[in-house]
Amino acid sequence: MSKPLPLLTSTTPVERADAARNREALLHAANELIEGCSVEGVTMDAVAARAGVGKGTVFRRFGSREGLMASLLDHRETVWQAAVISGPPPLGPGAPPLDRLLSFGESRMLLHLEQAALIEAAGRTWGDNEAVRGFLNLHVRVLLAELGVEGDLTYLATALLAPLAVPVLRQQLHSGMTQEQMHAGWAELVRRVVGPAPA
Amino acid sequence: MSKPLPLLTSTTPVERADAARNREALLHAANELIEGCSVEGVTMDAVAARAGVGKGTVFRRFGSREGLMASLLDHRETVWQAAVISGPPPLGPGAPPLDRLLSFGESRMLLHLEQAALIEAAGRTWGDNEAVRGFLNLHVRVLLAELGVEGDLTYLATALLAPLAVPVLRQQLHSGMTQEQMHAGWAELVRRVVGPAPA
DNA sequence: GAGCCAAACGGACCGTAGTCCGCTTCTATT
DNA sequence: AATAGAAGCGGACTACGGTCCGTTTGGCTC
């Protein structure tokens, strides 16, 4: 009679305690290695050794080096998304849509610049992350809709996000463009895409 | 007295005959391997073996695997650029600027989709290619100027090119968007950026 | 607490990118 | 044609990502 209805509880693939401990240790070790040298210093062998586990364990937890990098990014991303969803305006809710959109672009650009090395090291595992892409696209789409923009909002949102990608930013910096110019350029792009406010 | 003014002739770092022969053989071998299997099958050992040279030679010629891939792309890129510079309209000269711009976007998108695997394999070596980026940006910039667009044309050109990048296209295809939708979306983006024609 | 087993672990092993250095070959010069 | 020396060559070697499988361990049931 005490069997607690395994119908839904069985759907929780709980992680074993030692596995969880190891994941923490590995993430910690990876962060230390990044601080110690740079992202290139984060080899799978080094992470495993520093965490005191076998190499196979690292791959079991994260699938690949890119997966490990993506996990490191995940925490930062969550914090940032929280700021968008429920932080103070103009990034968070409460400001006019255009202000929010411009703030969004600047904030995302800075995040990408800060995490550039990690993002590039995470490669497709991060870039293909449905959750992140979906969140960014949805947020921009909603703001565009609030601004009265009509048309293929999904495409327009993607088009506004594309110039914020790390390779584009790197190239712009490399060719002498300042962060201010990049921000101003993006704002101009947004103004043109949004167009004149409807009466 | 017969020394032929080494001032400028010395600036030509001519390639030795055997080196040139080997480069051709290696490019040929790499193309064959791509046709035979896919881009993943193009390992440096395999290319060297098929061309009948040592592995060190491949690295001497192309610097890295990415460099080899970039060299393979170079030929296609040259052909495409020729079509833009001197091919038939509307991609080539002779058509109105807006037609040329829309044709440019569609053509570039198709090129990126065809060469996607190679472009991704070439990584930064291709992405950082100053000549290619410069050509694309300049061309778009000139067309925008002809259309009377004002502002930071370099940024706007980059922003129009960014959604044509391979990772973006791959993501869009993956989420069910058709090539027609992508083309239509880009055209809409261009119309919004260009804005109303000046009187 | 004993026993079971799925999950997790470890590290030897493999393939590939990239380096290094002693040897060979081309070409300019006389 | 001889020669010098620079440019090119080859392949053994290293480092790293990723796989595999025999062994260990945590957590559940009885």
Image (tube, coloured by chain):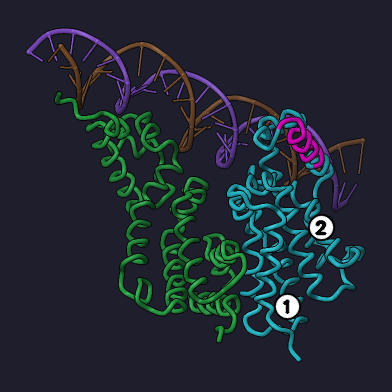
Chain colours: A green, B cyan, C purple, D brown
To which chain does the residue with label 1 belong?
Answer: B
A90 up-or-down from A123: above or below: below
B4 up-or-down from C22: above or below: below
**Three-letter amino acid code at the position of disc 1:** Leu
User: Residue B168 location, x and y as percent?
Assistant: 60, 55
**Three-letter amino acid code at the position of disc 2:** Trp
Residue in the foreground of this view, choosing between A24 and A39: A24
**Magenta segment main secondary structure:** helix
Q: Is residue B36 magenta?
A: yes
A1 up-or-down from D15: above or below: above
- Magenta stretch bounds: B24-37
Residue B100 picture quarter: bottom right
First in sequence, mark 1 or 2: give its number: 2
User: Residue B183 location, x and y as percent?
Assistant: 71, 60
Q: CA distance from mark 1 to mark 2?
A: 20 Å
| Discs 1, 2 touching: Cβ within 8 Å | no
Residue ID for mark 2 = B80
Residue in the foreground of this view, choosing between A35 and B22: A35
Report whether mark 1 lies on the same chain as mark 2. yes
Graded by Cα atoms within 10 Å as few (under 14), some (14 to 19) or many (20 or more), the crowding at tag 2 reads some
Circle 2: element type: helix
Residue ID for mark 1 = B144
Residue B151 picture quarter: bottom right
User: Residue A38 location, x and y as percent?
Assistant: 40, 52
Q: Residue at x 75, y 77 (%)?
A: B142
User: Residue B129 location, x and y as percent?
Assistant: 67, 59
Circle 1: element type: helix
A85 up-or-down from B143: above or below: above
Q: Residue at x 75, y 29 (%)?
A: B50
